[in-house]
Amino acid sequence: MNSADGRLDGLSDELLLVLADDIRHIKHTLERLDSLRAAVVKRDEEGLKSLLDEVESERADYALVEQKRGVICKQMADVVGCGIGEMNLSKLCVELTGERRDSVAHAQAELKRECAKLMKEHMATNILLKECSRFNNLLLRGILGNGRETVTYNSHGNASWELQKGMVSIRL
């Protein structure tokens, strides 16, 4: 084994620790999305506020993980002799052998599974929030508009509505 192989093995061990942090972060994000949807449905403003505070406090911690992943990726790209944009887990698996290759491939497969779940849950949360927005808009129109609202279009062609009763628009 030459020094490049030894260096790559050491970097892959460090990367596996970072990938484990990534997987934990994705799983925690999935839990937060469930909590967010539950808080929206229950109209739990305190729960939403505490969830937002939790996300804000953890942002800096995860930024360190992302930074560490970037440094390891750069070092691996230098050892392998490719650009940092070309360095990925599949390329790393080609360069590794034995148990390390299996560990990286396993982490890659788990990341793919968790990311697929995250995309699905993100879409579900997005749909819920859009439906809440649409429902609130319908309620406002029903309460305040009484069918006498004016639909206007902006320069991008997006429709908006303004009430003509009880309010004055000062937009030019």
Image: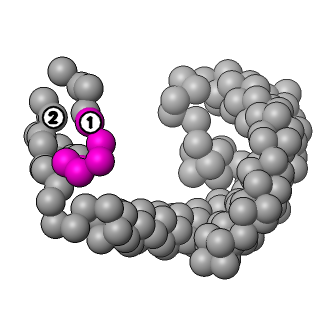
Point out which mark residue 81 bears. Answer: none
Question: Which three-letter amino acid code belongs to the residue tagged 2?
Answer: Asn
Mark 1, residue position = 168
Residue 133 picture location, percent across and down: 41, 63
Q: On the picture, is 136 further left or further right than 144?
A: right
Secondary structure mainly formed by the magenta segment? loop
Q: Read off the residue under disc 2.
A: 154
Q: Between residues 12 and 26, which one lies in front from this camera angle?
A: 26
Name the quadrant containing residue 76.
top right
Location of the N terminus (image quadrant)? top right
Which residue is depicted at the point 17% across and 55% down?
149
Q: Nearer the viewer, residue 105 or 31?
A: 31
- Three-letter residue code for mark 1: Val
- Label 2: how many residues lie within 10 Å, few (<14), some (14-19) or many (20+)? few
- Residue for point 64% across, 27% down: 77
As measured in the structure, the alpha-carbon distance from the residue carrying label 1 to the one carrying label 2 is 18 Å
Up/down of 137 relative to 91, above or below = below
Magenta-colored stretch includes residue 38 = no
